[in-house]
Amino acid sequence: RSPHPFPHCRPRRVRVSLFFAYFFARRSVTMRRRTAACPAFLSSLVLAAAALVLLLGPAPASSYKDQLKKVITKKAGHVHADHEPVHLIVNKVGPFNNPTETYRYYSLPFCRKHVPDEVVKVGLHGGHRLRHKLGESITGNRKETSPYELTFKDNVHWRLLCEEELSPESLQQFKDAIHNNYFFEMFVDDLPMWGYIGEIFGEDMILGETENSKTFLYPHLHFKIGTAKGQIVTATVYTQSNRREDITDTSQPKTIKFSYSVEYYEEEDFTHETRMQRYQDSRFLPSSFEVHWLSIINSFVLVLLLTAFLTIVLMRVLKNDFSRYMDIDEETIEEDENGWKLIRGDVFRFPQFPALFCAAIGTGIQLILCTFLLLTLALLGWVSTTKRGSILASAIILYCLTSCVGGYKSASLYRSMGGTHWVRNLFLTAGLFPCPLAAIFAWVNSIALMHGSTAALPFGTILVVLGLFGLVSFPLTVVGGIVGRNSAADFKAPTRTTKVAREIPSDVPWYRTAPFLMLVAGFLPFSAIYIELHYIFASIWGHQIYTLFGILFLAFLLLVVVTSFITVSLLYFQLAREDHRWWWASYVNGGTTGFFIYLYSFYYYFHRSEMEGLLQNSYYFGYMAVISYAFFLMLGSSGFLFSLAFVRYIYSRIKFD
């Protein structure tokens, strides 16, 4: 506890220096004893003296790595003192219409170093990559340091960042980026800021660049930062048209001065807890995003009325059937049997490919549970809905943790059906959703690597995801499958199944055929989420930050309930026409909404967005296929479970010989 003998030295440096001084002094004494004339004696003294100089010499100033560490470790919501450095982080650039096609910020020749200035205190260089969380890496974030010098509550009217002589190649890079409507993204205290790199005047919509068109670069950025109680609550970046550089002619080098200005003000409308709400009305984002509570409530009421109507009609029909079957005499029962009662010996005949069927049921239940848990955590605030990629990272972790549920449900249902190939069933359950996802990922990630985009996942992130699947998801699936297999009982059906299957009538009207019923089964639930689907698409495939998770939770719950009721209603009509192949039919009818979601993605792409290019198209249609497939599994499983309960109920109410 005594004062350090060398207060300007670091403890580790002291230990190393003392060790070398002791070692060389000891060596010199030994060599002197052996021979007084040995030159090694003099050299040892010199080395020992050098070690002492290293020990007693002045310590160097705070290293650059220490300053960089402060940028990495500073968390959002930090309470700043006056004149404290505020770190500005750059992230990525890319075409505004293609939100997935993004590239590193310094893929364009921006300034990496600040010119010497008497007020510069930190002196960070641009281009040092920061650490990223799992969700940030997956969403294509590549945060890096920047040379901008900002201090808390210190306004800057104008400050030179750097003066660069851009070569024709660099000028052409900027020009191509401006013609492709590139934007940049920066962060201040985890608050995103967007701006355009430049603009074009006089460009023809059809012919493009003409002789009279001009291309301007914005070399000056104005940062406007709102504060409240020492915390940064708003951040906006502006480009100024009166400070622009004409780079239409890229044949000759040109010297450009990059500069910036900073303005602080007291924010009264937002606090640190509510600061992300302002992005719903950001001018940089499309103005079509507005509060849509009335439309959502209108959709909910219509769907609930439709569901109630179908439920009342179905219950009245079933009541009439029960009354008719109970009043039939035993002598005339064989003559008057028709409809769903006639197929009592075939309705509980197990479906084809039972291992695949049970795997689909288990995977769907797992995805439903994962979705409900994710939305619940988002509502409770345990999962940050404002940080980039946090929802996606939480979904991956929750999927891995709920794998035991999928394995349990799949194995127990397969065992109750009398299945013997339970290992095959578990492998199908573990890979039914991840395998198609991995195939799509391999394709789109290869395209991103070819384009040099930040959308390509780093190798380390890929290893993390593979580790989660191999060390968490798959083992939990096996454990759940073993528990489900050992605890499952035999399938108890209300009726006995005949050995020979009954022939299915083929002369049915077109409106009672399987394709038409699939169309109805998918369209009605899709109408329940149609309005909300637009805002979800705009958030996933745009720059909007989605925050209405309460509405999303209700919409998903309503979707599951409506899908289940519609599937049960259509199942009754299928059984009434004496078609006992309802197992796969109820699953496909419930999951048809997934096909409608994928069809809607085409409508959104061509009529509600301006996305283009191979990279963006691959990501959009590839991952929309995965999302639609996930909805197919979830809604198909819920539709089947409701259908199974319905079939058990109606056949247990009638007594058969």
Image (cartoon, rainbow, N blue to C red):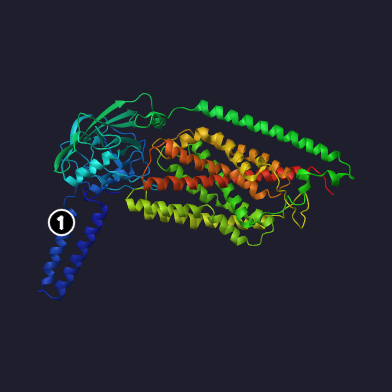
The answer to which image quadrant residue 466 occupies is bottom left
Residue at the limit of the structure toward the top, as seen here: 268
Seen as rendered, the residue at the extreme left is 37
Whether residue 365 is visible here, answered yes or no, is yes
Q: Residue at x 56, y 41 (%)?
A: 593
Q: Position of residue 39 (x, y in %)?
A: 10, 72
Looking at the rendered structure, the secondary structure element under dot 1 is helix
Report the side of 141 relative to 513 (left or right).
left
In percent of the image, x 89 and y 42: which residue is there?
329
Image coordinates for residue 426, horizontal then vertical, percent = 58, 58
Task: Name the foreground residue: 228 vs 225.
Answer: 225
- Residue 550 in sight from this viewpoint: no
Determine which residue is flagged by label 1: 53
Q: Amino acid at mark 1?
A: Val
State left or right for residue 646 relative to residue 445.
right
Quadrant hosting residue 309: top right
Q: Position of residue 250 (x, y in %)?
A: 17, 42
193 displayed left or right of 570: left
Tell me where residue 73 appears, x and y as whole percent: 33, 44
Q: Eyeballing the image, is 292 above or below 416?
A: above
Q: Residues within 10 Å of mark 1 (few under 14, many from 20)?
A: few
In the depicted structure, whether residue 230 falls above or below residue 401: above
* Residue located farthest toward the bottom when viewing the structure as drawn: 34
State the residue at coordinates (75%, 33%): 316
Tag count in the figure? Answer: 1
